């Protein structure tokens, strides 16, 4: 049974890790608010989970404000913010990189996360205790060919998370970064702009993580006793030793 006083907000909850996280948080007793751009997908997930779906484009300041205003009016306070909305666009070397792809990744993964966190902080501060969970990546501390825009954005998420932990020290707000390796979601389909064959090849001959594997870790992190802050949690498929090293069955 969802507790109306324990509210969790998940951005990018229309698919993948965000959807699985919203499901996991409902299972842990939280009332969930889900945000994303694709309203048909978002509302289907929200309805299935008995949560609240609200339109959210983290690249758009007015959309963030409208989302936060609606959450404030309906719930008054928020205990958990999962900054999950994010994407990779393209896999070109820097010399051939697309400016539009870089802008999209920086605006979504970096500015979107910064702005969303700033707008949500007053609601998090109204809760007796709160928790901010940022979706980083192993790309936040490793690099790979063609990943320059994405790795730069996830390195930024790591810096933001660490800065926030310093700045919120002394307040009852925990700050965690989740850093997954390869997870099979719509991530590669988005990266390769709908090219299903190219997206499928990413996971060929190996077993990637699922959104649920990552969601399990997020639920575990937020359900630790309130004095315990898990700073970072790195998880990868057993077949992946680094962003560049993956064992594949032939
Ligand atoms: P996904 O299935 O493509 O999900 C991405 C989610 O982000 C979707 O719900 C999408 O919803 C939302 N989103 C994208 N742009 C948005 C925007 N401007 N405003 C609001 N929502 C937006 O991919 P995923 O793998 O679950 O990715 C979730 C997070 O995990 C990302 O931050 C990603 O970088 C990170 N991550 C993924 C992997 C991996 O291998 N899959 C590994 C490490 C980290 P709409 O399109 O409906 O807006």
Image (spheres, grey):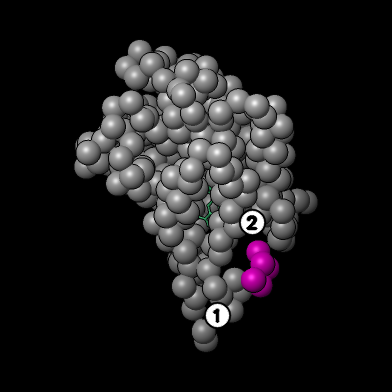
The residue to which callout 2 is attached is 138
The CA distance from mark 2 to mark 1 is 19 Å
Magenta segment boundaries in residue numbering: 241-245
Q: Is residue 176 above or below residue 163?
A: below
Let me know if residue 209 appears in the view: yes
Give the camera-side residue of 10 and 200. Answer: 10
Q: Secondary structure at mark 1?
A: loop
Q: Quadrant of the N terminus?
A: top left
Residue ID at (51%, 38%): 226
Q: Residue at x 44, y 29 (%)?
A: 79
Q: Position of residue 213 (x, y in %)?
A: 43, 59
Residue 90 location, x and y as percent? Answer: 60, 51
* 236 relative to 92 in the view: left or right: left
Relative height, residue 246 to residue 96 (above, below): below
* Magenta residue check for 203: no
Q: Name, please, the residue furthest toward the right.
A: 95
What is the x, y in percent for residue 132? 54, 35
Magenta segment's dominant SS is loop
Q: Is mark 2 within 8 Å of ligand 1?
A: yes
The residue closer to the viewer here, 158 or 4, is: 4
Point out which mark residue 38 bears: none
Q: Earlier in the sequence, mark 2 or mark 1?
A: 2
Q: Which residue is mark 1?
A: 248
Indicate the quadrant where residue 7 lies: top left
Q: Is residue 60 above or below residue 232?
A: above
Q: Residue at x 58, y 47 (%)?
A: 230
């Amino acid at each position: 049974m969802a507790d109306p006083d324990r509210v969790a907000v998940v951005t990018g909850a229309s698919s993948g890790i965000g959807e699985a996280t919203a499901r996991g948080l409902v299972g842990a007793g939280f009332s969930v608010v889900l945000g994303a751009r694709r309203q048909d997908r978002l509302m289907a997930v929200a309805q299935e989970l008995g949560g609240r779906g609200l339109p959210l484009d983290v690249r758009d300041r007015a959309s963030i404000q409208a989302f936060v205003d609606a959450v404030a009016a309906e719930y008054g306070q928020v205990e958990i913010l999962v900054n999950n909305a994010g994407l990779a666009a393209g896999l070109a070397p820097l010399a051939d990189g697309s400016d539009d792809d870089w802008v999209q990744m920086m605006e979504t993964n970096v500015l979107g996360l910064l702005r969303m966190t700033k707008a949500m902080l007053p609601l998090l501060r109204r809760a007796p205790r709160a928790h901010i969970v940022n979706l980083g990546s192993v790309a936040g501390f490793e690099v790979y060919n063609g990943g320059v825009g994405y790795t730069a954005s996830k390195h930024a998420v790591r810096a933001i998370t660490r800065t926030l932990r310093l700045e919120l020290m002394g307040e009852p707000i925990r700050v965690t970064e989740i850093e997954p390796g390869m997870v099979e979601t719509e991530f590669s389909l988005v990266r390769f702009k709908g090219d299903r064959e190219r997206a499928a090849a990413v996971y060929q001959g190996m077993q990637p993580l699922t959104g649920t594997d990552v969601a399990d870790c997020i639920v575990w992190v937020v359900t630790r006793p309130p004095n315990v802050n898990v700073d970072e949690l790195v998880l990868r498929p057993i077949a992946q030793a680094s962003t560049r090293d993956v064992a594949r069955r032939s």
